[in-house]
Image (tube, coloured by chain):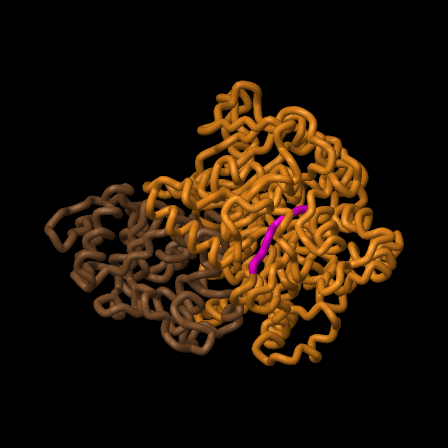
Amino acid sequence: MDRFTTLHAAAVPFARDNIDTDQILPARFLHMQRDEDHGACLFRDLRYAPDGSEVPDFPLNREGWRDARIILGGRNFACGSSRENAVWAVQGHGIRAVIAPSFGDIFAINAVKNGILPVVLAEDAVAALIAEAEAHPGAEIAVDLATQTVTAANGAVYHFDIDPFTRHCLLEGVDELAFTLSHQEDIAAFERRMDRSNF
Amino acid sequence: MPPEDAAPRTMFEKIWDRHRVLERPDGQVLLYVDRHLIHDGSEPAFDMLRRRGLKPRAPDRIFGVPDHYVPTDTRETAAIPDPARRFMVETLERNSAEHGFQLFGLKDEGQGIVHVIGPEQGLTQPGLLMVCPDSHTSTHGALGALAFGIGMTEVTHVLATQTLWQRKPATMRITVEGDLGAGVTAKDVILHIIATIGAAGAAGHVIEYAGSAIRGLSMEGRLTLCNMSIEAGGRAGMVTPDETTFAYLAGRPYAPKGAEWDRAVERWRALATDAGARFDREVTIDAAAIAPTVTWGNSPQDAVAADGQVPDPTQEEDAERRAAMQDTFAYMGLTPGMPVEELRIDRVFIGSCTNGRIEDLRAAAAIARGRRVAEGVTAWVVPGSAPVKRQAEAEGLDRIFTEAGFDWREAGCSMCLGTNGEIAAPGERVAATTNRNFRGRQGPGVRTHLMSPAMAAAAAVTGHITDVRRMTGG
């Protein structure tokens, strides 16, 4: 897993509420293998016309946002399907952080397990970041996991919360499986004492 | 485990406490997984497992079934024309053979959609903790299990350790009191709930559904209800196990038998939320206020009564939301304020983990009986499982459907999300008994309206969205 420390990058706005993972990665790409280019399918049906040409006003196709590495999302961003492929599409495009007032629970869990940082900020903070991004497309903002802050292009600083263990895993680029495997004896003890008749 | 005289607990808390293996200093809890359901989209997890040199810890707790990629016109894996899709089904078969977990293969008499076969086989039981790489795993909570969808990296973790780290969600009780009106089903109840609390209304919460209208639902209705908990953002949805639950489970292949059954029922009765237990949120819904319900937009929260009108975007005061709504109107081909019954449909899809069970097919057949699918409409019935299909055929439902002009098919997820290639054409309007009306869900440019099986059958025979009460005199 890639480490996440600090990120200075353009932020692309997707202000709408309830953007679902079917938009982020349409279901017809779900059978792609992990090492295939999921990034090319990110927002496929919103980003490209049926003939494959770019939809000109779609944010990812606009100057300043083509190489954005941060998404500014609306409420309940990435709700719906549990497909981790949606995270792989975000990741494949080069996005490393998503900032939104709230997330679909499963997406946020999947994100951190792939080194993508979901940042929850208050609605007015996200609205301010979006307004600034739209006023200055391509302006860089900074996301610093160590200090748990987002710094806007205008210098405004927003603090965010994150589980300490998740933060540790992201900062070090380690996943929790190795940690759990070091507790196999606890799992075995649980299995010995649990009521077999209920399983 | 806490002592018996501890503070009153909710059903969710009792199950959560029973499955705690460890707690981290940051409050995350390692939970033991009783049943791990997987499907034909699970290969990436096995691949990650192999790359780390690991094997499944408890193959006897894994149950696999192909559903997402299977065709509904054949039961031959080799006949799947697209190699990438065939690969998904074949790898599930190979993983089962390699690791020794139970597979309900494409030709198995128990095959079906994973969330239909879990309860049907008796794998789903009260008090169990169950996970599956599919967001509609919330379905299994209908029997009083704690069940939720997980991602592929989490599947790898469960395969390797039979456990999962989770932060304890908040609790929410949704109480639906009163009698449901004529033509109103569990599907209408859950669409009404989502329209009331919103698509993120239960985010971060485990829902317990309660009240007389919920207790009065059949097991199948409860499965429909819990299935769509995720469409309200809920982590899981649950119903207290009762006589309806026990009657449903008795005699199922994996259900306890004999004296073990009696002990199990005793344990299951003790799962009910204690008197005085506190929920973080409470919502009350009046059952009498629920009509047959249909969605008009691209979020399950965009739902109105079948005899109502689509909204008027110009009435929306928030500029961003007004723009989003106008965009939805353009995609869905709607006129502001139009009656939903004026929406002509091109295709009908009856099936899915939401509404592909025998009661759903009976309800649809009751409308289809003696009628004909309208000119120009393509209507499919895809049973939720092979046992549902056999039962329907034993009752003659297949003949009712085929005589009315419906296509009677094999079990699978099919057009709910189209991963098997079964999708509608751009611009087509679909009356669907599924769970998501997201843009492009049933194919690029496709317009999906969610509704109950009876409503979908009514749309099939009239050619437009129709309040089912007009056809039943209800």
Residue B185, given in percent of the width and then of the height, sits at: 69, 39
Q: Position of residue B294 (x, y in %)?
A: 61, 45
- Give the residue drawn at x 22%, y 51%: A131
Residue B338, position in %: x, y? 56, 46
Q: Is residue B24 above or below residue B428?
A: above
Figure quadrant of the C terminus of chain B: top right
Q: Which residues are magenta?
A: B447-452
Q: Main secondary structure of the magenta part?
A: strand
Residue A180 in sight here: no
Q: Colour of chain B?
A: orange
Q: Would residue B306 be visible to someone looking at this image?
A: yes
Magenta span contains residue B119? no
Q: Toward the viewer: A166 or B397?
A: B397
B215 over A171 or under it: above or below: above
Q: Quadrant of residue B411?
A: bottom right
- Position of A34 relative to A154 (above/below): below
Closest to the observer: B320 or B237?
B320
A161 on left or right of B452: left
Q: Residue at x 50, y 43 (%)?
A: B311
Chain coloured brown: A
For image coordinates 17% across by 49% down, the residue present is A147
State the image quarter where residue B114 is shown: bottom right
A27 lies above or below B22? below
Residue at x 75% of width, y 43% of height? B256
- Is B451 inside the magenta-drawn segment? yes
